[in-house]
Image: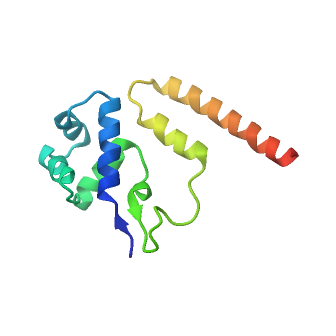
Amino acid sequence: MEGRMDARRLYEALDAGRRARDLSWRQLAEQAGVSPSLLSRMGNGQRPDLDGFIALVQWLGAPAEEFMVWPDGTARPGTQPALETQLALLLRARDDLSEADRNYLLDIVNATMRHIKADRRDS
């Protein structure tokens, strides 16, 4: 594979997720199952190893492709994932919502997307 990981983008996403959850870097490391020194090294521009990368994207609830740069400089190949897919990932990553709340919000998102797609077909 010729693509490369955008470590800076991953670190920035981790920082945003950490702040949104009101966590310290040490708490993030504990939750993600990585060492605090890995996060410190990433803050200094180093890339995580494969296991660390997987653990961190799982903690974020984001697809690994979000943090890939392809040979032509694009952030990801082809088209973006469907909006409802991206929103589902965000909702699934929230630990302040119950499973019932997540499913309720996903039902609303899916109903809204069906409505939008129907309106586009009718236009």
Residue in the image at 24% along x and 57% along y: 51
Task: Provide residue 66's location: percent of width, then percent of height.
Answer: 43, 55
8 relative position to 107: left or right:
left
Q: How many marks?
A: 0
Does 90 appear above or below 66? above
Q: Residue furthest right?
A: 122
Residue in the image at 20% along x and 41% along y: 29
Task: Provide residue 71's location: percent of width, then percent of height.
Answer: 42, 74
Q: Quadrant of the N terminus?
A: bottom left
Residue in the image at 83% along x and 48% along y: 121
Does 32 appear above or below 105? below
92 relative position to 23: left or right:
right
Of the pair 99 and 84, the residue shown nearer to us: 84
Does 33 appear above or below 24? below
Task: Provide residue 109's location: percent of width, then percent of height.
Answer: 63, 34
Colouring scheme, one of rainbow, by chain, secondary structure, one colour: rainbow
Of the pair 92 and 112, the residue shown nearer to us: 112
Does 24 appear above or below 43? above
Residue in the image at 28% along x and 55% along y: 53
Residue 103: image quadrant is top right
Task: Provide residue 55's location: percent of width, then percent of height.
Answer: 28, 49
Q: Residue furthest left?
A: 37
Residue 117: image quadrant is top right
